[in-house]
Every structure is written in C-alpha cells, then in structure tokens.
Amino acid sequence: MDMMVSSAQDEEAPGAGDLLLWILAWSELAAFGSLLVAFMVAGIVQADKFAMARQHLDPAIAALNTAVLLTSGWQAARAARPSASRNEVRRALIFAALLGFLFVAVKLFEYSGEIGRAGEEGYGSFFELYFLLTGFHLLHVLFGAMVLLLVSWRADRPNVLLITTLWHVFDLIWIVMFPLVYLA
C-alpha cells in the first residue's frame, strides 16, 4: 500500500509546476501579442511611413536569424526527449543556448545598421515600435539562453521541460513576428 501512495505522489509531482508553466507561457504570448497588435495598428495608420521604413530592414539577415532560432528550438526539443541520456540533454541544451547567443549577436549586428533611423520623423513610429518589439524578444532570447546553460549544468527533467517549453514560445513569437515586421 505504501508503494502505491509513493508511486501516486511521484506521478503527481511533475504536474505541480504545469500550471505555473502555462501561466508563464500564455502571459508571454499575451504580452507579445499586444505589442504585435500595436505594431500592426500603427502600420495601418501610418502605412506609407511604415512601407518606407521597411525598405531599411534586411529580411535576409532576419531570415538567417529565423534559421538560427529554429535550429536552436530543434536542439531544445532534442533535450526534452524522454529517451535522451543526461549527456545528450546537456549537449542539446548547450547547443541551443549557443545558437540563442548567435541569434543575439546577429540581431545586434542588424541593429547597428538601423539604430540611426530610430529618431527620423519620416518613418513615423516604425523604428520605435520595431526596436521595442524586437528588443523585447531579444532580451527574452538572451535570458532564455542563459537559463538553458544553467539548466544544462543541473539537467533535472522538470527544469528541462520548463525552459524548453518557454524556448519554443520564443520561437513561436519570432515566427509570427518575422513576416509581420519584415515582409508585410
């Protein structure tokens, strides 16, 4: 009987953080969703200025960053596999983190060519919203990459599932953001 109680408690323990995880994931989606809606509304109101401003973006760099982030997400998914050994989990988390840092470096390089336009009146609010939206995402990726490294050091299954789920949320946000910001 004691064995059954212990077994039942073990099965319930992993679910204890699920609610927090989904609250965190949905709050991220809501925050970014609000920023994306603001960006789209401003783009409708200032359509000509946004069209002019988009000409100064480099969709090829953003596409490269999309590939980097999705490859990082693939590594995070490999780390979350139930069949992955501890060493496989660690390697995948470290690789995912390094690709996250590469995303940040590429984004900062991209910013270096765009930052001078932020205050130009002719582009309306495009660059202010662009830097707010993409910068907020950049900070999430940077922080997430640091957490991926931290979790790789202590790769407990609940921690791995938490950070990899959030990492996929950051991927999803970028997948929505990329066409709306760069290709619309």
Image (spheres, grey):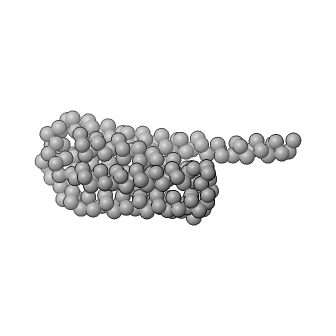
Q: Residue at x 27, y 55 (%)?
A: 61
Q: Residue furthest right?
A: 1
Q: Quadrant of the C terminus?
A: top left
Horizontal side of residue 39 vs 160, given as left or right = left
Viewer-side residue, 133 vs 145: 145
Horizontal side of residue 176 vs 129, given as left or right = right
Q: Residue at x 34, y 62 (%)?
A: 105
In this orientation, does residue 2 appear?
yes
In this orientation, does residue 119 appear?
no
Count the labels in the image. Answer: 0
Horizontal side of residue 180 vs 25, given as left or right = left
Q: Percent position (x, y) of residue 182?
A: 25, 46
**Vertical arrangement, residue 20 with respect to residue 95, above or below:** above
Q: Residue at x 47, y 61 (%)?
A: 95
Q: Percent position (x, y) of residue 11?
A: 71, 43
| Residue 19 found in image quarter | top right
| Residue 108 found in image quarter | bottom left
Q: Residue furthest bottom?
A: 153
Q: Percent position (x, y) of residue 3?
A: 83, 45
Q: Percent position (x, y) of residue 85?
A: 61, 58
Viewer-side residue, 150 vs 19: 150
Q: Quadrant of the N terminus?
A: top right
Viewer-side residue, 39 vs 156: 156
Q: Residue at x 24, y 43 (%)?
A: 183
